[in-house]
Image: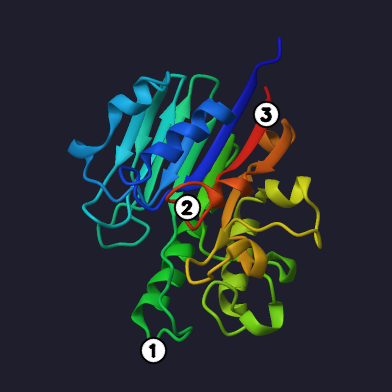
Amino acid sequence: MTDSLKIASWNINSVRFRIGIVEQFLREAAPDVLCLQETKVVDDDFPHEAFRALGYDHIVIHGQRMHHGVAILSKLPMAEDDRLDWQANGEARHVGVRLANGLRIENVYVPAGGDVPDRDINPKFGQKLDFVERMTRWSEGLGGVPTLLTGDFNIAPLECDVWSHKQLLDVVSHTPIEVAALARLQAANDWVDLGRQFVPPPERLYTWWSYRAKDWAASDRGRRLDHMWASRDVAAQATAHRVFEGCRSWLKPSDHIPILTEFAF
């Protein structure tokens, strides 16, 4: 018997402020599991009831006031949740769970890294690189655990993952040092990049557009910052991957859009 499973991820940039479009997405896309990043709310104030009203009775959250924050909402039971401090300062940037079928889901919000790609001048950039390095060490120890790693990685690795490779080479999120760090992370567990498995390069595939653009769609200066990676055994069971670009035009949008992979286990 084959079970279909849809898992989505979205940096929502304040779950309470944008609860309306989260509810709209859940009604229209109907994922079984939704991983949220940048929820920007303490655990006690998380809008549990809005999600339970849509059938997401299983909620695991790791919140923080005004900043960061991650959550996993599921129609299916979840267990063994953990919160790894890859930032090494207590920021709420990771939560992980295990589903009943044994699949591990790790939801991560990698730091943006500030504006200057030099750790000596900009400590935030160094924190970002160290964060990815800690994720790499963790990945090396996963062994054969079936795992899905998803979230806002804040790095666009391929030349075709940004609107202009040449113009963004010195812009944080697409610098060679970040791309190399992400490549080491990917190699550490032989992760499969599901987005590019289904939309091969150099096809256009963006998940983020700045708020600064007056007309984001017309200028289309996008970057692929949001990712869904799977261990080889899990990737082999992926049947489809979608990005929901239309959500960028919804009322009070996030600057990120949801991504979703469907699996047949």
Residues at circles 1 and 3 in contact by the CB criterion of under 8 Å: no
- Which quadrant would residue 261 be assigned to in this image? top right
Q: Separation of disc 1 and disc 2 at Cα?
A: 26 Å
Residue 71 visible? The answer is: yes
Kind of residue at disc 1: Asp
In the rendering, at what x and y percent does residue 179 appear? 61, 71
Residue receiving disc 3: 263
Q: Secondary structure at mark 1?
A: loop
Disc number lying in front (2 or 3): 3
Q: Separation of disc 1 and disc 3 at Cα?
A: 43 Å
Q: Which mark is residue 138?
A: 2
Residue receiving disc 1: 120
Decide if residue 208 is on the left or right side of residue 265: left
Residue furthest left as drawn = 44
Decide if residue 103 is on the left or right side of residue 54: right
Q: Which badge, 1 or 3, is on the more N-terminal residue?
A: 1
In the rendering, at what x and y percent does residue 82 appear? 35, 39
The image's colour scheme reads rainbow
Disc number lying in front (1 or 3): 3
Q: Residues within 10 Å of mark 2 (few under 14, many from 20)?
A: some
Residue furthest top as drawn = 1
Residue under the point 53% across and 69% down: 214
Decide if residue 202 is on the left or right side of residue 43: right
Residue 71 vertical placement versus 152 (above, below): above
Question: Which corner quadrant holds the N terminus?
Answer: top right
Q: Which badge, 2 or 3, is on the more N-terminal residue?
A: 2
Kind of residue at disc 2: Trp
Q: Secondary structure at mark 3?
A: strand
Q: Considering depth in this image, is 193 or 138 the residue closer to the camera?
A: 193
In the rendering, at what x and y percent does residue 184 appear? 61, 64
Q: Considering depth in this image, is 158 or 249 the residue closer to the camera?
A: 249
Disc number lying in front (1 or 2): 1
